[in-house]
């Protein structure tokens, strides 16, 4: 297990400006959930227009599927389908009725709704997911702010059969991005509102070791000031790469919590709603970064190869 985390001072964080950032696509409607494809393209979700979109290596944009709510995090499953966390859309829209998890056939665009509730309680805002080697997936439910009320978040573990759902962690404070360590022995999740990254030891499919005391040892790192954590990816060295809200860019946290580096995109591509990152290319050193506020996807050569996921397309 990792050592207890600590809040990092802003002046203790190394800041690196990435060189060679290139625009892949723009005009997107709050992109999220990037999934790197074997042809050099990427699939993203467009939250605000409820679309799942494929971007070719040449930047050509095609709609894979149209759905309801707000499609968020996405991942390829063991059957080659795309699994999507849907946050249910914005509460202020007046149409929000809860969130869910879908299976999407990439070839046909057909959507199958897998999970809408757990033990009679409606899912609030499923956000991001990651598959393990056993073929199941962990996903975060961020909760939902509903006027003066807010649902408390959870971490779930599910099977692709649509009939296997376990609440692994509750309560969780606005859990957003989620990932697994290279050995699968640690599940990481990012807390949006607190800008904390938590790490829990996995003891089996859908089970984690209990917290000790107040659970401070589960905090791998926390950042100061007004900023937030969005979705994340893990690299081949086990570093956790977290997309940043408010400040923009990607913050990389070592698996022992002993170093934090913030990578920024430079003024041309700065976006205060950097929503997610994934890795692709033959050597997994191409980072695809989704920029929600400006509606763009950019690519850049990443300093460390990404972690090869359990399933890819």
Image (spheres, helix red, strand yellow):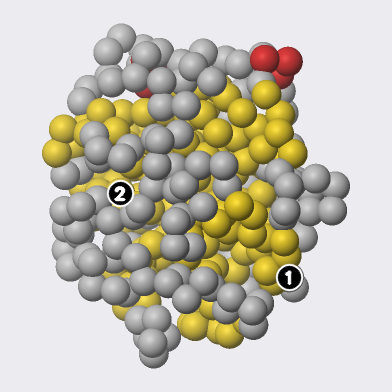
In the rendered image, is residue 53 in sight? Answer: no
The quadrant in which the C terminus is found is bottom left
Q: Is 209 or 79 nearer to us in this picture?
A: 79
Q: Is 78 or 40 nearer to us in this picture?
A: 40
What residue lies at 39% left-to-right and 90% top-to-bottom?
Answer: 108
Q: Outermost residue, bottom direction?
A: 108
Q: Which mark is residue 26?
A: 1
The quadrant in which the N terminus is found is top left
Disc 2 is placed on an element classified as strand
In the rendered image, is residue 205 in sight? Answer: yes
Q: Is 92 or 251 nearer to us in this picture?
A: 251
Q: Horizontal placement of 34 versus 60: left or right?
A: left
Disc 1 is placed on an element classified as loop
Residue 202: x %, y % from top left:
22, 34
Q: Horizontal placement of 248 versus 91: left or right?
A: right
Answer above or below: position of 126 versus 153.
Answer: below
Q: Outermost residue, right direction?
A: 267
Residue 189: x %, y % from top left:
42, 37
What residue lies at 18% left-to-right and 68% top-to-bottom?
Answer: 161
What residue lies at 48% left-to-right and 82% top-to-bottom?
Answer: 65
Q: Which mark is residue 138?
A: 2
């Amino acid at each position: 297990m990792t050592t207890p985390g600590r809040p990092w001072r802003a002046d203790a964080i190394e800041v690196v400006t990435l060189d060679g950032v290139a625009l892949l696509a723009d005009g997107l409607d709050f992109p999220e959930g990037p999934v790197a494809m074997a042809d050099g393209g990427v699939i993203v979700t467009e939250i605000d227009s409820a679309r799942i979109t494929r971007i070719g290596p040449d930047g050509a944009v095609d709609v894979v599927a149209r759905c309801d709510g707000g499609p968020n995090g996405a991942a390829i499953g063991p059957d080659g389908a795309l699994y999507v966390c849907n946050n249910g859309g914005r509460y202020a829209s007046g149409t929000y009725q809860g969130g869910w998890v879908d299976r999407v056939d990439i070839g046909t665009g057909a959507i199958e709704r897998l999970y809408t509730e757990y033990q009679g309680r409606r899912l609030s805002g499923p956000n991001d997911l990651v598959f393990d080697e056993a073929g199941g997936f962990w996903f975060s439910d961020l909760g939902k702010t509903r006027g003066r009320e807010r649902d408390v978040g959870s971490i779930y573990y599910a099977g692709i059969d649509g009939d296997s759902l376990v609440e692994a962690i509750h309560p969780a404070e606005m859990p957003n991005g989620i990932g697994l360590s290279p050995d699968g022995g640690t599940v990481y999740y990012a807390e949006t509102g607190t800008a904390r990254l938590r790490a829990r030891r996995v003891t089996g499919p859908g089970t984690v070791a209990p917290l000790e005391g107040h659970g401070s040892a589960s905090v791998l790192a926390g950042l100061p000031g007004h900023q937030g954590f969005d979705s994340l990816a893990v690299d081949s060295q086990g570093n956790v790469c977290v997309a940043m809200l408010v400040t923009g860019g990607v913050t990389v946290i070592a698996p022992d919590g002993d170093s934090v580096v913030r990578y920024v995109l430079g003024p041309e591509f700065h976006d205060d709603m950097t929503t997610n990152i994934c890795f692709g290319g033959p050597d997994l050193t191409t980072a695809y970064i989704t920029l929600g506020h400006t509606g763009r996807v950019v690519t850049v050569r990443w300093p460390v190869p990404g972690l090869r996921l359990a399933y890819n397309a």
